[in-house]
Amino acid sequence: MVIGLVYLLGTRDYLGLGVTNPDPEAVTILSSFTPDGATPLSWWWKLLFTAVTLSCGFKGGEVTPLFFIGAALGNAFATLTSAPVDLFAGLGFIAVFAGATNTPLACTLMGIELFGGHYAVYFATACFVAYFFSGHSGIYASQRISVPKRARETLPPDVTLREVSALNDAKGNFSPSFQRPRLNPSDDTMMSSENHVLSNAMGKIHIYLTPRDRVPASGFWEKMIPRLTYREIVQAAKKDGLKSASSFMTHYGFCNGGKIETKGSEAPNPNLTLCVELIDDKSALEDFCKRHAGLLSGHMIVYKHVEHWNVQARPVVEGGTSPNGDTNGNSPLREPVEDA
């Protein structure tokens, strides 16, 4: 497809990085800063070449093509509005990248570094406007959202761009509130009466502490390499054979009567409450707490009764015949027997 586009346009200007080109008449990032250095649609052609390459599974770049697209787009706007070409090319250069990476402040500083501080206000305006209008999308799917861009949006804490994309509705519009996906009533596999959910009682404890809590050190090397309490608890749970153990950070609150702590915007807050969750039978959890009293002493521990659900799907053989030979799918299913 890329080769076909090259023959269609009759130029190789949109191949490669596009920073420079041996042909002095070619469209490049540098030429976009000069009058007549780009065509009104150069930004579109570079965008198309890059999109085709990436969507076909090839490596098409994640930084330099954005610089090319932005600079060429700035050139087109400057030509259209009779504005300074070099200024608008610079604004497009940093603004498109700011919108794609959700980093307006860093791109503003990058603009000052590359083009000087005389137009810092213009750089900041372009970058933050691009950042706002790019929505919750970007080239880094694992990037986490600390604060939603729109006030009415409610998102789970530290949700990633990839997870936000999964929350979009069928029309492609963002759902303003986080909701669990509902089962499709037409999905026979999910809604079939042949499927069963078995439940049995279990227990869950939450242990509240902070990331900086450490196991008391007894020797020189233990003092040099401290052991974090929450990691020791999870490792002990694994060693003792508990069914589940995990730790997760909170974002705002206090524990054990301490002061209110909040999540840091740049660096993690070591005083923010951390929760370790252990799941198993109540008796197993009690034995664990007794066995590791030295680890758990002094920390708030909360126990809660929960249920363990075991979903068992009834297999259906080809042709709609159930394993017991009934073809209408309405025969009673023998109740599964739980393991002791």
Image (cartoon, rainbow, N blue to C red):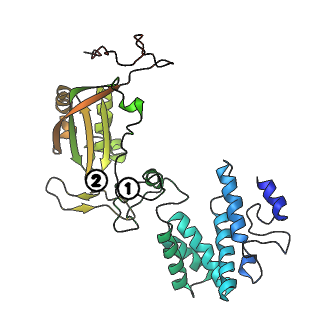
> Residue at coordinates 26% horizontally, 59% vertically from top-left?
252
| Residue 60 visible in the snapshot | no
130 in relation to 314, above or below: below
Residue 24, given in percent of the width and then of the height, sits at: 85, 74
**Dot 1 or dot 2, earlier in sequence:** 1
Quick one: 242 or 319, which is closer to the camera? Answer: 319
Q: Secondary structure at mark 1?
A: loop
- Residue located beneath label 2 in the image: 250
Marks 1 and 2, Cα distance to the nearest angstrom?
A: 10 Å
27 relative to 1, above or below: below
Q: Is residue 270 visible?
A: yes
Kindly identify the residue that appears in the image at 35 percent across and 18 percent down.
Answer: 330
* Nearest to the observer: residue 132 or residue 240: 132
- Label 1 neighbourhood size at 10 Å, few (<14), some (14-19), many (20+)? few
The amino acid type, in three-letter code, at marker 2 is Thr
Query: How many marks can you see?
Result: 2
Alpha-carbon neighbours of circle 2 within 10 Å: few (<14), some, or many (≥20)?
some
Q: Which mark is residue 53?
A: none
Would residue 59 appear left or right of 336 to someone viewing this image?
A: right
- In the image shown, does 271 or 262 lie closer to the viewer? 262
Residue under pointer 1 = 158
Name the spot of residue 137 as percent of width and height, x first: 50, 60
Q: Residue furthest left?
A: 257
Q: Position of residue 35 (x, y in %)?
A: 75, 84
